[in-house]
Image (cartoon, grey):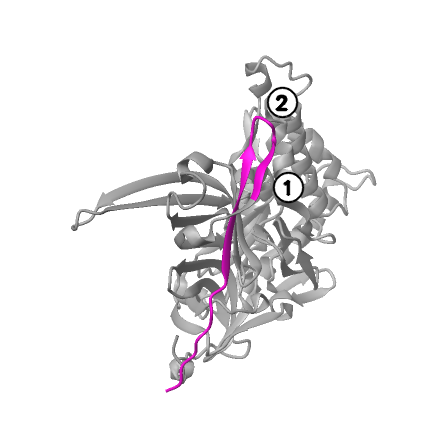
Amino acid sequence: MGEYTRRIDIRIEIDLWDWPAGRMSRQGLNLTTSVFNYRFQKSIKNPQGSCQMTMLPQSIDTHILDIVKPLDVIRIYEFGRLKFMGYVTRVSYSGTINKDGKPGRDAVISANQFGGLLLTAAMGFGLGTALGQDEGPILNAAAQLSIDILKATADGVSFSEIVGLIYDSFITFIESIEATQNFVSYLDEYLDTSAGLSSVNTPLLPRQPEFFTGTEQQITFWQAAEQLIEKPFNELWIDNGPRKVSIDSSEVSLPEKSCLVLRPTPFNGKKTTTGTLNLFDNLPSIHIDKDHMLRFDLARGMDEVYTAYSVKSASFQPGEIARLLLGDMKVDEDRVGKYLFKPLITELFFTRMENEDGDSLEAQTADAQTVTQNAAETLLNWFSLNEDYLSGAITHMVPSDPDADPKIGDKITVYGIEGFFYVEGIAHTWQYQGPLKSSATVTRGYNRTKKIEVKDKIFRRNQIQ
């Protein structure tokens, strides 16, 4: 039996921030030789991500507790490519006495991706007043956001413009409060909110964000954006570059920052006015070869099996919803006999009103029902094979070629499995004198012509780590 070996190449840096001055005080402090181990993970479903690393507490010019503070910025490079960037959330220090009487000490740094700030930091009514500042015409965060988003209600406005308006509202709020103005330069340094946004994708239906005009005292960027992007037909997530991501039928290069990614969910069988699109088939794929494959944990099940699909408007009243479900629901006739009635009901936010062309309410409603029927058929086409899909985790050695390393939002193939998977999450782990590994959380495992057959050859190889 032969042997497969390689040299691990990692680098770990931290940027230190002087918050009273609103600037970086030290850039790229190298922590690499101090770190024992680390683990970071990212997911399409959670913009925060996470990272935790264990290190010597006093191997740099001062104790780690004295120099590293919350919101300092961690960067992890693997084989010369930035793989994780996030802000410090916690620094801890622990000590033990070994059996031989010698002390043991280590420090742990925890961090999140920059999406965590967009998920948790809110536009809050009353903050300026509490700080003795006149907030001017801003009545509350929800009302101000609604005023801004109303600019994006016209037909043909793309989702990128809608998300851009939400982010501009977030920044305007930060800049309007004297005590938080320094935060804008911090976000500008590390966050890109435009490079990864679809420029041609537009809402299925016209909308007016009436759900923002209530009495909400606060709302975050992520809460607002997720309500307006028409999930699950679109996906919004965050990852750092440099990397390529498939958006609008082309590959876009993300810069070396934390980047928002907004694109149509790569459904196969997506119904449009011009035909049916197979977006998943058109994604470029990355292959995990036999030299890097370590482990797979895959399963089929009925957890996300549905037998009826409906897309409705949030503005329909209960009686209208019943009529809509009865008249426009798409039923999976092949599976309803086996799994009974298990509906998947998706809500699209829009308001029916007389438009500038004077179309009647009935005409607009008919148009809306055509759109929702097509959307329901898209869901049927996409989810109907869920009982046959493989999902789970695939663990492999991180390749020295960064472009060959699967990332969230990628389509992958795997040695020994004749089919494709969609990567929804990744987790990288490393420990001193150990391997650098990645575990990809995968779904949609399927072969377009038949179910995947997992073959024994997946571990028939003539090399070891």
Q: In this view, does 442 lie to the left or right of 184?
A: left
Residue 266 lies, with reference to residue 446, above or below; the image says above
Quadrant in the picture for the C terminus: bottom left
Disc sitting over residue 297 in the figure: none
Residue at the far left in the pictured view:
99
Mark 2 and mark 1 lie on one chain; the one further toward the N terminus is 2
Q: What element carries label 1?
A: helix
Residue 129 lies, with reference to residue 77, above or below; the image says above
Q: What stretch is highlighted in magenta?
A: 1-27
The residue where tag 2 is placed is: 177
Q: Quadrant of residue 110?
A: top left
At 69% from the left and 45% from the top, the residue drawn is: 365
Taking depth in this image into account, of 262 and 234 the one nearest to the observer is 262
Quadrant in the picture for the N terminus: bottom left
Residue 5 lies, with reference to residue 380, above or below; the image says below
Neighbour tally class for label 2: few under 14, some 14-19, many 20 plus, Cα within 10 Å: some
Taking depth in this image into account, of 95 and 164 the one nearest to the observer is 95
- The mark lying in front, picked from 2 and 1, is 1
Q: What residue type is labelled 2?
A: Ile
Where is residue 360 shown, x and y percent of the image? 76, 41
Where is residue 13 shown, x and y percent of the image? 52, 49
Q: Mark yes or no: residue 392 visible.
A: no
Q: Is mark 2 on a helix, strand or loop?
A: loop
Residue at the far front in the pictured view:
61
The residue where tag 1 is placed is: 189
At 62% from the left and 49% from the top, the residue drawn is: 257
Is residue 25 within the magenta segment? yes
Is residue 317 within the magenta segment? no
